[in-house]
Amino acid sequence: MKLTKTVYQSKEAKDNTNLNRSFSEMKKNEDNISVHKFFQYYEKLFYTIPKKGSQSHSTLFKNSGNYIDDPVNSKDRKISELHAKIIELEFKLSQSDNS
């Protein structure tokens, strides 16, 4: 295989508009992944991601919940509603016992 190399003088390089002066080949492509690609990676890694910890499913769940303005788990909300209903019914029951 024969390799060839073209050498430009400084002035020639400035005047040549066909030269690519960017460092795009050295740039990491992983830093600019799309949402689609993220979910492809997520699907592949799903069972290798730990359930708990700083890089885990629970962290993803918590961060996503905070981002969508729903930091309170829906189960917690339902538990609070049921607890309030129990207190209300106990109060009504105690009122009927005193009558």
Image: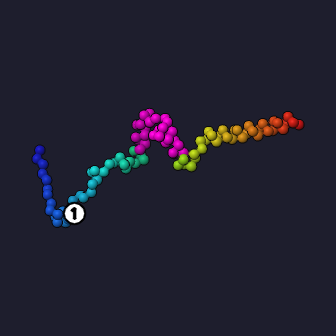
Is residue 17 found left or right of 37 in the rendered image?
left
Relative height, residue 98 to residue 13 (above, below): above
Which quadrant is the C terminus positioned in?
top right
Residue 74 in picture, x, y percent from top left: 61, 41
The residue sitting at the front extreme is: 54
Q: Would residue 77 be counted in the magenta stretch? A: no
Q: Position of residue 95 (x, y in %)?
A: 84, 38
Question: Residue 76: where, in percent of width, then height?
Answer: 63, 40
Where residue 87 appears, x then y in whole percent? Answer: 75, 39
Range drawn in magenta: 38-65
Which type of secondary structure does the marked residue at label 1 adopt? Answer: loop
Picture colour scheme: rainbow
Q: Is residue 71 left or right of residue 81?
A: left
The mark tally for this picture is: 1
Reading the image, the residue beneath label 1 is 17
Q: Residue at image x 43%, y 38%?
A: 43
Looking at the image, which is closer to me, 37 or 48?
48
Give the residue type at disc 1: Thr
Magenta stretch prevailing secondary structure: helix
Quadrant occupied by the N terminus: top left
Identified at 40% across, 37% down, the residue is 44
Instruction: Answer left or right for 83 relative to 91.
Output: left
Residue at the extreme right of the image, as rendered = 99
Please tell me which residue is depicted at 72% across the width and 41% down the height of the picture.
84
**Magenta span has 52?**
yes
